[in-house]
Image: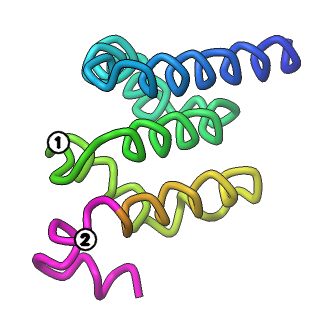
């Protein structure tokens, strides 16, 4: 049920955001519980959940303080893949994720050729 899925992901995002704003130490707890599920969605190519996954990842990056954990830089590689941008439904979430990476992971992105690939 697409409507149920939408509201479920939105509820998770609000829970993560509000709880982490009150207690920043909860970010790592949410990462520990959400990352395995988000990785399953990405690795199993569950494309209907990609926009939600990218939104949740953007939120988690946003809630982190620099330097962000290295696992996020693995996810950053997805942003550099042209295939990620082919589905129009992914684009708003990918743009948000890219913006957050540029704000929070400036040092990590400037290393190597990542910035060139973004440009």
Start-end of magenta stretch: 104-119
Residue found at x 76% / y 59% = 88
Give percent across and percent down for residue 111: 11, 76
Residue 49 versus residue 75 in the image, above or below: above
Residue found at x 57% / y 58% = 96
Q: How crowded is the residue under tag 2: few (<14 C-alpha within 10 Å), some, or many (20+)?
A: some
SS for dot 1: loop
Q: State the separation of the CA atoms marked 1 and 2.
A: 13 Å
Give percent across and percent down for residue 103: 37, 66
Q: Which residue is tagged 2?
A: 106
Residue 87 counted in the magenta span: no
From the viewer's perspective, tell me whether residue 92 is left or right of residue 53: right
Labels 1 and 2 touching (C-beta < 8 A): no
Residue found at x 53% / y 61% = 83
Quadrant of the rendered image containing residue 114:
bottom left
Quarter holding the C terminus? bottom left
Quarter holding the N terminus? top right
Residue 80 versus residue 16 in the image, above or below: below
Task: Tell me, for residue 60, which label it has, or none.
Answer: none
From the viewer's perspective, tell me whether residue 10 is left or right of residue 64: right
From the viewer's perspective, tell me whether residue 108 is left or right of residue 80: left
Residue 116 versus residue 67 in the image, above or below: below
From the viewer's perspective, tell me whether residue 13 is left or right of residue 88: left
Residue 47 vs residue 8, the one in the foreground = 8
Secondary structure mostly seen in the magenta stretch = helix
Give percent across and percent down for residue 71: 20, 40
Task: Tell me, for residue 69, which label it has, or none.
Answer: 1
């Amino acid at each position: 049920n697409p409507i149920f899925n939408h509201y479920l992901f939105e509820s998770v995002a609000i829970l993560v955001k509000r709880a982490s704003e009150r207690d920043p130490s909860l970010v790592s707890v949410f990462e520990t519980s959400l990352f395995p599920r988000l990785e399953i969605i990405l690795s199993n190519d569950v494309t209907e959940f990609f926009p939600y996954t990218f939104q949740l990842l953007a939120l988690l990056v946003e809630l982190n303080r620099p330097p962000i954990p290295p696992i996020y830089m693995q996810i950053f590689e997805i942003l550099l893949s042209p295939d990620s941008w082919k589905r129009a439904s992914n684009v708003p979430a990918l743009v948000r994720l890219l913006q957050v990476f540029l704000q929070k992971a400036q040092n990590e992105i400037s290393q190597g050729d990542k910035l060139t690939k973004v440009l």
